[in-house]
Image: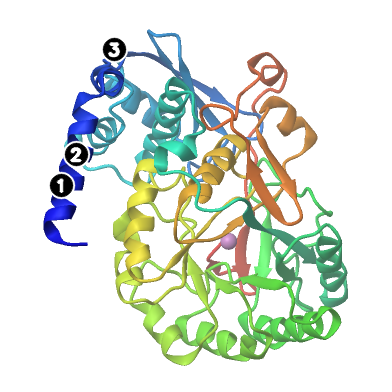
Amino acid sequence: MNRRHFLKNSSLGFSGVLLSGALLDAISAPIPKMKITKVRFYESPLSRPMVNQSMHIVVVETDAGLTGIGEGGYVDGIRECAEMVIGEDPTRIDHCWQLMFRGRFYPAGREKLHAIGAIDMALWDIKAKMAGMPLYQLLGGRSRDGIMVYGHANGSDIAETVEAVGNYIDMGYKAIRAQTGVPGIKDAYGVGRGKLYYEPADASLPSVTGWDTRKALNYVPKLFEELRKTYGFDHHLLHDGHHRYTPQEAANLGKMLEPYQLFWLEDCTPAENQEAFKIVRQHTVTPLAVGEIFNTIWDAKDLIQNQLIDYIRATVVGAGGITHLRRIADLASLYQVRTGCHGATDLSPVTMGCALHFDTWVPNFGIQEYMRHTDETDAVFPHDYTFEKGELFVGDTPGHGVDIDEKLAAKYPYKPAYLPVARLEDGTMWSW
Ligand code: CO
């Protein structure tokens, strides 16, 4: 095409837009004015007395009658954030986020990020309802049809875990996280607590689980050897190290697991010192995932920029809502790091709904964790997402598509439930 021809065409096209009265009207139509009038907080019976283990539900009300639902935070954090945004225009989501994050002398820390996350989810819900669109449309639209999820297969030993993985394969899962109890470790965390629905927070005071790195390093690779022997290599297998290993031990585990081609090794070592992952990375090609307890982009910056991880596991609620999780995902995309949002039953269907809209949009999606809620929880939180053949699909309900039945919820009084703590044999506290 020659230049003159191009200019002629483009100027025609441009004037065509300017002359279209209908389009001009659409562009100049005022966005209805709206104000946040009230923020309500609901402590679910499934709540845990820890801010990063949520099910605290927040309802943001507006003078236009639209309400949004979010999840996260604790009473004081929610109160502080609510005081800041009441009277604000709920459509100014980034502005409200900055206000909550920077609007007091100290920038928000871990606890407050959860409260910000709750209100941010509600604001996206309001805006999407106002637009009459499912939330993913506001983010940039659909990048994929279904969201690949992984389920939790647990057993008290290798044989039990192999069987549990088989159950997930039968249900159509394409990806399964496999955890096994280890002989000689008393009450290892998260094993042998039933099939599809298990709740790791099991007591009103924290129970104690054991840990022994040497025994785990001897046993865990045998689980994956057995899984590959039994089921072949067609399914994605994942494993969670729960921050229990030192970088050198984690490197050793990653190396031993290489023949079994894991989708990822999660939380292999604590990430407070992001440089620790360099040691792991230098020694193994097993893909690494971390971040379910991360809050801001700064928690992940070095890990991402130095390409020390393959998957970032930050959640909508923990990472200050959709607004901030999107920033993390965009940074990650520059370095070919993909998302793998935490999605255990510490989070209600509200966070799951938001995560699924996020996953439907985010270009550098990897996988989504999915622990099923009980029928009681599902009834309290009617939601528009469905499971089919190892994937979750969001519907087209405007907003994030998750509601709360407040009457039904009121029937379940709040009762605290803690996650267990981990101790070495000599009683030393260890990472959860
Ligand atoms: Co984990």
Q: List the residue tagged with mark 1.
A: 8
Q: List the residue tagged with mark 2.
A: 12
- Residue 158 occupies which quadrant of the picture? bottom right
Q: Where's residue 386, x and y in %?
A: 71, 41
Q: CA distance from mark 1 to mark 3?
A: 40 Å
Q: CA distance from mark 2 to mark 3?
A: 36 Å
Which residue is depicted at the point 59% across and 85% down? 253
In this rendered view, identify the residue nearer to me: 326 or 156.
326
Q: Residue furthest left?
A: 4
Q: Where's residue 356, x and y in %?
A: 56, 45
User: Which label sits on residue 223?
Assistant: none
Residue 296 lies, with reference to residue 219, above or below; the image says above
Q: Tell me if 294 is positioned left or right of 349 in this view.
A: left
Q: Nearer the viewer, mark 2 or mark 3?
A: 2
Q: Residues within 10 Å of mark 3 (few under 14, many from 20)?
A: few
Residue type marked 2: Leu
Q: CA distance from mark 2 to mark 1?
A: 6 Å
Residue type marked 3: Lys
Which residue is depicted at the point 46% across and 72% down? 310
Element type at mark 3: loop
Quarter of the image for the N terminus: give it.
bottom left
- Residue 203 occupies which quadrant of the picture? top right
Q: Tell me if 280 is positioned left or right of 108 in this view.
A: right
Element type at mark 2: helix
Which residue is depicted at the point 45% across and 14% down? 66
Q: List the residue tagged with mark 3.
A: 33
Circles 2, 1 touching at the beta carbon (< 8 Å):
yes
